[in-house]
């Protein structure tokens, strides 16, 4: 007596369900791979807190200005190994010699700005651009916008993370409006060097 074995073909609903499961599996695999790439792009220590001494510099505007020492405090958050965002506050004083009437005076400066940093090779060298607001106080006060391109190194002398050394050179461009004086609006361009000590975590 012969026995017949019947093989049932999957129905259309079963085929649709199988294809749906395959699509879901592909999406999960892509999400895992994509998430892995994002994690690999993140640096091991994305946060850096730093404070430093702003050294001597020059400012060229309506007066020849010798910028004195000051303090800089900043926070930096790495987005990828090549880009980071930061917030910076600063303050210093300067000694000025007016090139028109040979008078001299001291000027105090304070301000805050955001910074976007780019590490072109993923190493210690970076360039960045700061945008912010600043106030100057002397015999008259002045306030205005600050644009400050910068270049520097973020040197990690030991294992990744921990203490870092950050020397920089900055070219601040101050577009200010004078209050209580006779000169009105003016533009100053400076050149400053800063060395900061930070902690990456």
Image: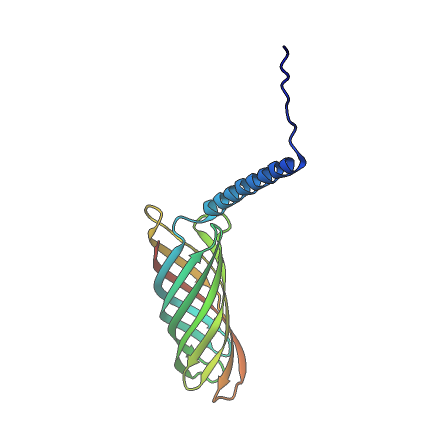
Q: Report the number of discs.
A: 0
Q: Residue 188 at x, y = what percent?
A: 51, 74
Q: Residue 60: give x, y in percent of width and height.
A: 49, 73
145 or 109: nearer the viewer: 145
Q: Residue 115: where, in percent of width, then height?
A: 47, 63
Give the residue at x 37% y 71%. Answer: 68
In screen coordinates, is 149 left or right of 52?
right
Residue 69 placement: quadrant: bottom left
Specify the quadrant of the image occupied by residue 108. bottom left
Judge left or right: residue 85 versus residue 196: right
In depth, the one of 41 and 149 nearer the eye is 41
Q: Quadrant of the N terminus?
A: top right
Q: Which residue in the rendered view is the most extreme toward the right? A: 12
Residue 91: quarter of image: bottom left
Outermost residue to the top: 1
26 w.r.t. 196: above or below: above
Rendered residue at 36%/61% (across/down): 50
Is residue 150 depicted above or below 26 in this figure? Answer: below
Colour pattern: rainbow
- Residue furthest to the front in view is 1
Above or below, comparing residue 2 to residue 102 in the picture: above
Locate residue 15 relative to residue 67 in the image: left or right.
right
Return the residue nearer the eye: 6 or 179.
Answer: 6
Up-down relation of residue 79 to residue 24 (above or below):
below
Counting from the top left corner in percent of width and height, residue 169 is at: 44, 61
């Amino acid at each position: 007596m012969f026995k017949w074995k019947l093989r049932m073909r999957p129905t259309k609903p079963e085929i649709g369900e199988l294809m749906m499961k395959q699509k879901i599996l592909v999406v999960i695999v892509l999400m895992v791979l994509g998430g892995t790439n994002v994690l690999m792009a993140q640096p091991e220590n994305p946060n850096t807190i730093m404070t430093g001494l702003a050294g001597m510099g020059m400012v060229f505007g309506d007066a020849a200005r010798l910028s004195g020492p000051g303090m800089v405090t900043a926070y930096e958050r790495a987005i990828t190994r090549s880009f980071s965002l930061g917030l910076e506050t600063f303050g210093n004083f300067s000694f000025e010699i007016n090139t028109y009437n040979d008078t001299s005076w001291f000027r105090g400066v304070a301000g805050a700005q955001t910074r976007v940093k780019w590490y072109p090779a993923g190493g210690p060298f970076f360039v960045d651009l700061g945008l912010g607001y600043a106030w100057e106080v002397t015999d008259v006060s002045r306030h205005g916008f600050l644009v400050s391109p910068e270049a520097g190194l973020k040197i990690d002398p030991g294992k990744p993370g921990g203490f870092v050394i950050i020397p920089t050179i900055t070219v601040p461009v101050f577009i200010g409006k004078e209050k209580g004086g006779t000169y009105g609006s003016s533009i100053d361009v400076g050149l400053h060097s800063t060395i900061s000590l930070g902690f990456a975590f």
